[in-house]
Image (cartoon, helix red, strand yellow):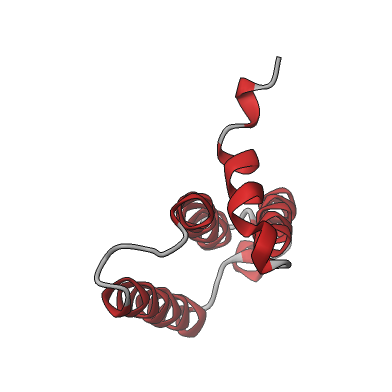
Amino acid sequence: MTDARFLVADNAIVRFHADVQEYASVVNASIATAHGGVSPYPLSASALYALTADLFSLHRAVLSVCQDGWAFTAVVLLRSMLDLLLNAAVIVEAEPEAEYRGFKYMHFFLKV
């Protein structure tokens, strides 16, 4: 029988993950502070805020499955994270269209 620990995240990775997540939170807060808490682009900012929340959650979920020895299942979560990052890239790719794209991302369900 093989050692079950080979799929478990190392403690150094767990600490590094916590540091990176804290850094991302600080960067996000400093961006909000720089604009006085109000974005000059409310629609695209809302879309990016939603994407960020989903990315944080999925990032934490990847760590959880790795800590519990289910690292091979992280592939599905990583693919979802890639999809979210691509959505963010599309929204911000062209500044003149960012608000429209943010609106489309946040309100796609209104399409009949």
At 73% across and 59% down in the image, what residue appears?
Answer: 90
At 65% across and 31% down in the image, what residue appears?
Answer: 108
Q: Position of residue 70 (x, y in %)?
A: 63, 53
Q: Position of residue 97 (x, y in %)?
A: 68, 57
Q: Position of residue 100 (x, y in %)?
A: 64, 48
Q: Up-down: is 49 above or below 17? A: above
| Residue farthest toward the front in the current orientation of the protein | 96
Q: Position of residue 48 (x, y in %)?
A: 52, 57
* Quadrant where the image shows the C terminus: top right
* Quadrant where the image shows the N terminus: bottom right
At 35% across and 77% down in the image, what residue appears?
Answer: 22
The reply, left or right, for residue 109 in relation to residue 37 is right
Please tell me in which quadrant of the rendered image residue 88 appears. Answer: bottom right
Q: Up-down: is 83 above or below 6? A: above
The reply, left or right, for residue 25 in relation to residue 101 is left
Q: Up-down: is 75 above or below 33? A: above
Residue closer to the observer: 37 or 13: 37
Please tell me in which quadrant of the rendered image residue 4 appears. Answer: bottom right
